[in-house]
Image (spheres, rainbow, N blue to C red):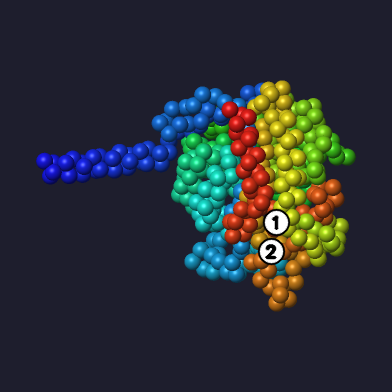
Amino acid sequence: MCLFKVSTKRVLIVFFIVVLFFVIKLEARVPSASSKVYVKKRQLVVEKRLKNGLLNKPKPYIIKGTTWSPATRAPHKGPHPFNPSKSVPYGFFFDWKDRDPQGHKVLGYWLRSQFKKYYLVDILLMKKMNINTVRVYDSLGNNPQEWKKILDEFYRNNIMVILTVAASKDDIDSKKYIKLVKHCKDHPAILMWSLGNEWNLDYNKYWGYKTISEAARATEKAARRIRHLDKDHPVSSCLGDRFIDRKPANTIAWVVRNCPSVQIWGINVYRGKSFHNLFDVWQNTSYKPFYISEFGTDSFYTSKFKVVNRFQADNCEGKVDDRRRGKFLLELWSEIENNLSALNPAKVCVGGLVHEFNDSLWKVGSYHLSLGGLVNYNDPREARSYATYNSEGFYLKGSHPDNVSNEEFYGVVDAKRRPKEVYWVLRKYYKKLEQLGE
């Protein structure tokens, strides 16, 4: 009788282990079909793909999250972008004469390589922060085989992705965006596609096109092609805050009219402690919804600095002040909340993405930020500052509490992935938004 009892216990233990195994496997399973996402008047509507393969009921969606580019601390050397078996200098990514390959080529390759390194830890931190959306500025790695693993992890953690499928004129001309859409369109973690970032602004050289008109034509053509390839996700494009200009063809209103195939727009907005008339202006600009694709400020409060070349802030002195930053972000989020179309269909905004998830120590010395000239490459104290924090940035009067954008301090987690104070502030607020949207 005793042997029978022991045997029964063993059978039950084995049974529960088997059941647990299948439950875990079921939880880890990622469906092979997409979620359904579409624009309905001013709302973004999502039918999420459930783990059992069925679609959940339609629900107006609130974007609440961050932008995400996981690269943090640049190494001294790394793989050659076109011949990974060969090593080339990394460090600062500023372009200079006779550098081969040029810094921006090395930077692009390195940025994409960092997704594989950080995605597991970052996505867990995002989930804990109650993020439901991330915006990515490029493909999720240099190897397409990595993309699915990263998207799978987002899906398992109930986070959706705004994936930029074209970041430059080269991506349009090479048809890279078509490859990305085809490869990822059936994944349930995709929220929408995005074309470019602030391509309407002069500093960004209109994606590499000569004029905004040329860039707009290319955007419209790409948007039409994507919509033909994929009926389950909307196409968006992200613009810089340029509603007023001496030339009407340079304004957001002109761009929106000339890109009718873009279904929802993202606007990067840095106007200080308020968005001011943004929502009213958009109401009169387009019948389509929009989301704030970047907003916020950095953690470094600058008390003293020197202006160089009219817009560069050099010799910045100050301190990290995340308490001030937390209050600043909550004020901005309260304005977004009051204009969410998910809560009131008459409103115009779908949500917002705080810039950005992690601190980026590589930025001072980067070609595209025009901050490389502030680094003295011959000074031993600065020779490897690409691996440390640099407080240099941009002088942007009225855009930030201290009028300075300190480019390496924008993360809600620091360079070691330690949550800052603002991380916990947003975590609490995003939980509240989740409850409002239920």
Instruction: Tell me what residue is drawn at x 65 percent, y 30 percent.
Output: 263
Q: Which amino acid does label 2 sit on?
A: Tyr
Q: Do the residues labelled 1 and 2 touch (CB within 8 Å)?
A: yes
Q: Position of residue 212 (x, y in %)?
A: 76, 41
Q: Mark 2 points at which residue?
A: 389
- Image quarter where the C terminus lies is top right
- Say which label, 1 or 2, has the lower sequence index: 2
**Residue 124 position (above or below residue 33):** below
Tell me how far mark 1 sits from mark 2, CA to CA.
8 Å
- Image quadrant where residue 290 sits: top right
Q: Is residue 184 left or right of residue 348?
A: left
Under tag 1, what secondary structure? Answer: loop
Q: Which amino acid does label 1 sit on?
A: Phe
Q: Where is residue 434 in the image (x, y as percent from the top left)?
A: 60, 33
**Residue 176 position (above or below residue 310):** above
Label 2, residues with CA under 10 Å away: few <14, some 14-19, many ≥20: some
- Image quadrant where residue 338 sits: top right
Q: Is residue 204 left or right of residue 132?
A: right
Q: Where is residue 293 in the image (x, y as percent from the top left)?
A: 68, 41
Instruction: Tell me what residue is drawn at x 55 percent, y 66 percent.
Output: 78
Q: Residue 278 carries which label?
A: none
Under tag 2, what secondary structure? Answer: loop
Instruction: Tell me what residue is drawn at x 79 percent, y 61 percent.
Output: 318
Q: Where is residue 106 in the image (x, y as percent from the top left)?
A: 61, 61
- Image quarter where the N terminus lies is top left
Residue 141 visible in this rendered orientation of the protein: no
Most foreground residue, 208 or 303:
303
Residue 364 visible in this rendered orientation of the protein: yes
Instruction: Tell me what residue is drawn at x 81 percent, y 47 percent.
Output: 399
Q: Mark 1 points at which residue?
A: 409
Q: Is residue 228 left or right of residue 272?
A: left
